[in-house]
Image (cartoon, rainbow, N blue to C red):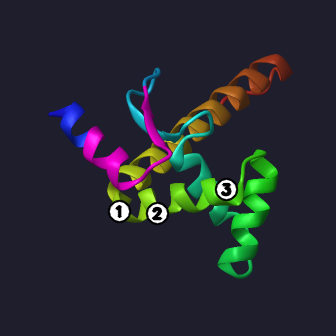
Amino acid sequence: ERYAREGLATDAHPGIVFTSGPSGRRAALAGGPDVWEIVAALRMTTGQEQDRVATVADQLGIHPRQVTIALGYAADHPDEIEGRIAANQRALSQAEQAHQARQRLLDGAPGS
C-alpha cells in the first residue's frame, strides 16, 4: 500500500520523492529539503506568494520552481505536512526544555 500511495503522489507531483529517516518516511524534494521544512519556511515569510517563494528558494539554495512543487504537494496532503510541522515544534520545545534544565543545573538554580 505504501508503494502505491507514494507512487501516485510522485506521479501527481514530479520532483517529490520519499525518504526514510529517524522520524519515518516523508515527502521531500529530490536532492532537497523535506516538504514540511519548505512549508514551515514559507510561513515565516511575508508578502505576495511569488516573493515568498523566491525568498525561501534563496534561503534554501533551491530553484523557486522546487518551492512551488513542494507547495503543491503540501496543498494536496495538508494533514501529513501539518503533522510533520507539529512534530518538529514538539521536538524543538522538548529540546529547549532539556537545555533550560541543564542550564539550571549548571547555574545551581533550583528547578521550576
Could you tell me how far apart the alpha carbons at marks 2 and 3 are, in whole angstroms? 15 Å
SS for tag 3? helix
Q: Nearer the viewer, residue 32 or 40?
A: 32
Q: Nearer the viewer, mark 2 or mark 3?
A: 2
Furthest residue toward bottom:
48
Q: Residue at x 72, y 70 (%)?
A: 52
> Mark 2: which amino acid?
Gly
Of the two numbered discs 2 and 3 on the same chain, state the one appearing first in sequence. 3
Residue 112 visible to the viewer: no
From the top left corner, tell me how far across and down residue 55 is, in percent. Answer: 79, 63
Q: Nearer the viewer, residue 39 or 8?
A: 8
User: Where are the magenta residues, as a range?
Assistant: 6-19
Furthest residue toward right:
107
Horizontal side of 24 relative to 108 (left or right) equals left
14 in the magenta segment: yes
Residue 49 visible to the viewer: yes
> Mark 3: which amino acid?
Ala
Could you tell me how far apart the alpha carbons at marks 1 and 3 are, in whole angstroms? 18 Å
> Mark 1: which amino acid?
Asp
Label 1 sits on residue: 76
Label 3 sits on residue: 41
Q: Is residue 61 above or below residue 91?
A: below
Could you tell me how far apart the alpha carbons at marks 2 and 1 are, in whole angstroms? 6 Å
